[in-house]
Amino acid sequence: MFRFIQKLALLCTVIALVAGQAAANIPPAKKPIRVLMVGGGSSHDFDRWYKGEDVATLQKDGLAVVTYTSDPSTILSQLPNADVLFLANNQPIADEATRKAIFAFADAGKGLILAHPAIWYNWKDWPEYNEKLVGGGSKGHDKYGPFDVTITNKKHPLTKGLPATFHLDDELYYFKTDPAATPIEVLATGKATTSENTYPSLFVVKYPKGRIVGIALGHDAASHTIEPYKKLIRNAVQWAANLSVD
């Protein structure tokens, strides 16, 4: 009986050691990326497509935890808790302290995603925004309608898992670079089915310190609900946070 107890105790010890070793080899769970998303303003249903659809897309499977605001006055207090600032606002960020904080955020190596209206020439009293963070901007777009997006750099992490070409209805932004601004690297272009003109749909702003992604897409359901767009913004959040893209 005593030998049986000894053997049982030895077996339990071995099992515990094996279990402990297995647990030690399990990689720690990734912490969700903390995203501060800013929307609000005219011409778009921000609550439906950014606060609703995009927040759900980013939070799926624990990729991110997203704080959404349509009040730019709250950016300053919430920015210190974010890994990525996702700007999709069509309204001014007028507070000087908030503007400086956004630049300080980028200078600290953090990530910015500039989506749809955020790459527009909106702020005449803040030219540094377009010059340094956007690399240019858009002053117009095609009438809402169909166009094709074509990936021009298939090797970049931001385009990982995206189809070579995909179709959607959206506003084809006339994004143009500014020779005096921060240079950009175009990763995908958009071209209307009725025109030969192409414009950047996805690009990286080569800001010297932070990681900045420009996304021209995002007017309504025809963008926010399709799989390529969902994959794109998930890639963007991971890349902007300086993480490997799944």
Image (cartoon, rainbow, N blue to C red):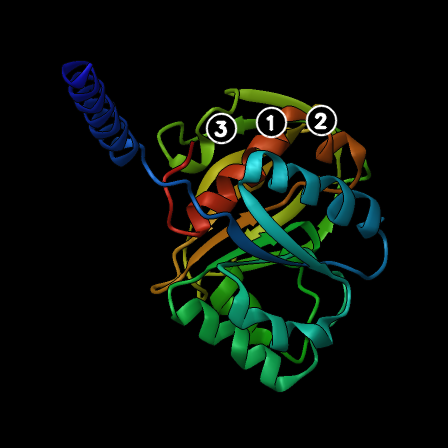
* Picture mark count: 3
Residue at image location 61% in from the left, 71% down from the top: 78
Tag 3's secondary structure? strand
Q: CB of mark 1 within 8 Å of CB of mark 2?
A: yes
**Tag of residue 151:** 3
Whole-Å distance between the Cαs marked 3 and 1?
Answer: 11 Å
Q: Position of residue 222 (x, y in %)?
A: 77, 30
Query: In front: 41, or 148?
Result: 41
Residue of label 1: 228
**Residue 226 placement (x, y as % from top left):** 69, 26
> In the image, what residue occupies the spot 56% across and 46% down?
64
In percent of width and height, residue 233 lies at 57, 40
Residue type at mark 3 is Ile
Quick one: label 1, few (<14), some, or many (20+) residues within 10 Å? Answer: many
Question: Mark 1 and mark 2: span between their CA atoms?
Answer: 10 Å
On screen, 42 above or below 152? below
The residue to which callout 2 is attached is: 168
Given the image, on which type of amino acid does mark 2 rest? Leu
